Image (cartoon, rainbow, N blue to C red):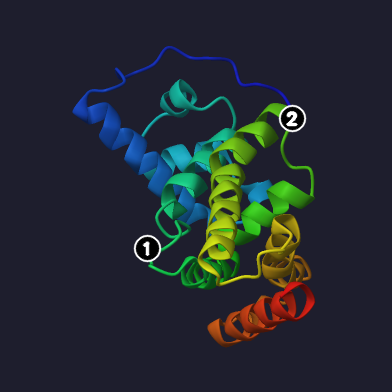
């Protein structure tokens, strides 16, 4: 994948006009993702919709993929954050419901394409991993450990196994394109079965 030639920036990072342009680019990328396949979406289209030049986009992002990574992370950072709760398991359950909703969106499908179809080069995959996956994974494991500590899960619960049990069914259905069945009802049933299974096996 070629790297676009860097152009002289039109604006200075940090100025109000610059930040408005950046927000317009992010919003335009998100809106276009929802109506166009990833492979056909171009930086020129994003620039036109945002009312900026392509040079302005390359001022901040090296490639289209870098821009879309940033757009998805910024747009869904709050949505995918674990909700506050006194119960670690309740926080996990509610985050799984939010995550399921995300995977049914166009942005969620873009995420699945990125992680399963090799759309990204190694440096982009690392960026996506560090900015999107790793924070969620780390917090998920912390909450599982907290649930063990508070007695919501058995003391002998293997943390990686609990993570896989709670996430696996959701991602399997999403990867198979069966997003129509990913509802809050399904998530609650899956969650209850997984927790009951951990208690039966390790309690």
Label annotation for residue 122: 2
Q: Residue at x 38, y 67 (%)?
A: 85
Which one is closest to the eye, mark 1 or mark 2?
Answer: 1
How far apart are labels 1 and 2 at the CA level? 34 Å
Of residues 187 and 117, the one drawn nearer to the viewer in this rendering? 187
Left or right of 7: which side holds 17?
left
Dot 2, crowdedness within 10 Å: few (<14), some or many (≥20)? Answer: few
Residue 51 can be seen in this image: no
Q: Quadrant of the C terminus?
A: bottom right
| SS assignment at label 1 | loop
The residue carrying mark 1 is: 84
User: Total label count?
Assistant: 2
Residue visible at 63% across and 86% down in the picture: 189
Q: Mark 1, residues whose alpha carbon is within 10 Å: few (<14), some, or many (≥20)?
A: few
Apparent side of residue 20 relative to residue 124 in the rendered image (left or right): left
| x, y percent for residue 199 | 70, 78
Q: Name the secondary structure under disc 2.
A: helix
Q: From what the image shows, is residue 166 above or below residue 1? A: below
Q: Position of residue 59 (x, y in %)?
A: 44, 21
């Amino acid at each position: 994948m070629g790297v676009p030639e860097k152009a002289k920036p039109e604006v200075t990072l940090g100025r109000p006009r610059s930040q408005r342009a950046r927000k317009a680019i992010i919003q335009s990328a998100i809106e276009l993702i929802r109506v166009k396949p990833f492979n056909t979406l171009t930086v020129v289209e994003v620039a036109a919709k945002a009312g900026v030049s392509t040079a302005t986009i390359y001022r901040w992002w090296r490639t289209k993929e870098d821009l879309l990574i940033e757009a998805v992370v910024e747009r869904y950072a709050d949505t995918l954050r674990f909700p506050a709760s006194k119960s670690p398991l309740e926080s996990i359950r509610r985050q799984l419901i939010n995550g399921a909703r995300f995977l049914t969106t166009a942005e969620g499908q873009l995420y699945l394409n990125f992680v399963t179809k090799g759309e990204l080069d190694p440096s982009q995959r690392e960026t996506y991993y560090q900015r999107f996956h790793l924070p969620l994974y780390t917090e998920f494991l912390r909450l599982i450990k907290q649930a063990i500590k508070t007695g919501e899960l058995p003391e002998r619960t293997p943390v990686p196994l609990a993570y896989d049990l709670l996430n696996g069914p959701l991602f399997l259905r999403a990867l198979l394109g069966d997003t129509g069945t990913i509802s809050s009802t399904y998530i609650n049933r899956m969650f209850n079965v997984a927790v009951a299974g951990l208690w039966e096996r390790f309690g």
